[in-house]
Image (spheres, rainbow, N blue to C red):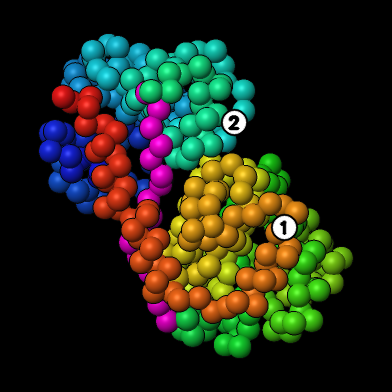
Amino acid sequence: MLALSNMPEVDGVDILPRLQPDPATKLPAGIRQFSACKSRLAYAIRAIWLAATLRPQVVYCGHAFMAPLAYLCARLAGAYLVSHVHGLEVWQPLTAIKRRALAASDLILCVSRYTEKKVIEVTGADPSRCKVIFNTYDERFTPGDKIAAREKFKIPREATVLSTVSRLDPQQRHKGHDRVIPLLKNLTQDYPNLVYLIAGKGGDRARLEELARNSGSGDIVRFLGFVADDDLPDLYRASDIYTMPSHGEGFGIAFVEAMACGTLALGLNVGGAGDALRDGELGLAVTEENFPDTLRVALARLPVDHTDLSERTRAAFGRPRFAARVEEAVAPLFS
């Protein structure tokens, strides 16, 4: 929204959130946010009323599930419809009404090339209306004091540290913890002080804890539970390699956050992860078969130049580059 509000063609941005755990306090100039609605019906009624009274030039839909309502609001206001798709929501079957609403969008912003490919396949959308806009990251993700970061998480200075950040949801086992944990015991032959940090909470933790015990790596894996957003930069800084061998990423913003902190990132060249890792240009994107060997080789080549990696990540995914991509995609709607 900030990138849109900063465009010279845009007079202002009005936001109607579906859910709002914390009330908005201070918003940037040009952005106004209405209070959230408790029910879906109330939300739909208010969205339609705002579209009819404010008559926006563009209606932005941030999730495929909202596409039918957004389509109705756009047509009611005589506005362009811009839909933003992320990944899993268009990788699974969509109802006919959602498919039609997405396909009718004047512009579909996709977080990765893979997501763009899937949305075209699923909805039959005109490829010329689809634009890839890679996600950006918060600028607090920068290199920092590695020793202090390790002290925060009570990690020995001499440890070799791997990490993964994700929800431990039984429905999202694609994140790849299962691919890392069985490798750890063997890796300790070369890296006796190996530590694997798993940040996140969810119902799959007990299964992963059992996997760690059964694979002989129970004393290597540390389950951190929920890690607050403010502490994530230090978690990445404390790590030697951020690894998430997932086969279900629409993009993989955690890869980018880690690399922005100067930490090497390793994932699979599946889904949208290749775009986040720049197909090996910034991080490492490999096949599932080659993942174990690549992890071992990456550990042997440590350390990396943290400042250089951070600067190259910012050039590719920082807010200035993101804003330029947004303006390039959206500006034609205002001409």
Q: Residues within 10 Å of mark 2 (few under 14, many from 20)?
A: some
Residue 139 vs residue 324, the one in the foreground:
324
Classify residue 122 by image quadrant. Answer: top right
Q: Amino acid at mark 2?
A: Trp
- Residue 84 vs residue 46, the one in the foreground: 84
Q: Secondary structure at mark 1?
A: loop
Answer left or right for 70 relative to 277.
left
Screen quadrant of the N terminus: top left
Check if residue 136 falls in the magenta segment: yes
Q: Is residue 222 left or right of residue 234?
A: right
Residue on which disc 1 sits: 290
Q: Which residue is mark 2?
A: 91
Q: Tell me residue 308's x, y (percent).
A: 39, 71
| Magenta stretch: dominant secondary structure | loop
Looking at the image, can residue 264 be seen?
Answer: yes
Name the quadrant containing residue 85. Answer: top left
Q: Are marks 1 and 2 in contact (CB under 8 Å)?
A: no
The boundaries of the magenta stretch are 129-145
Q: Quadrant of the C terminus?
A: top left
Above-or-below relation of 174 to 177: above
Tell which circle, 1 or 2, labels the residue nearer the N-terminal end: 2
Residue at figure coordinates x 35%, y 13% from the top left = 72
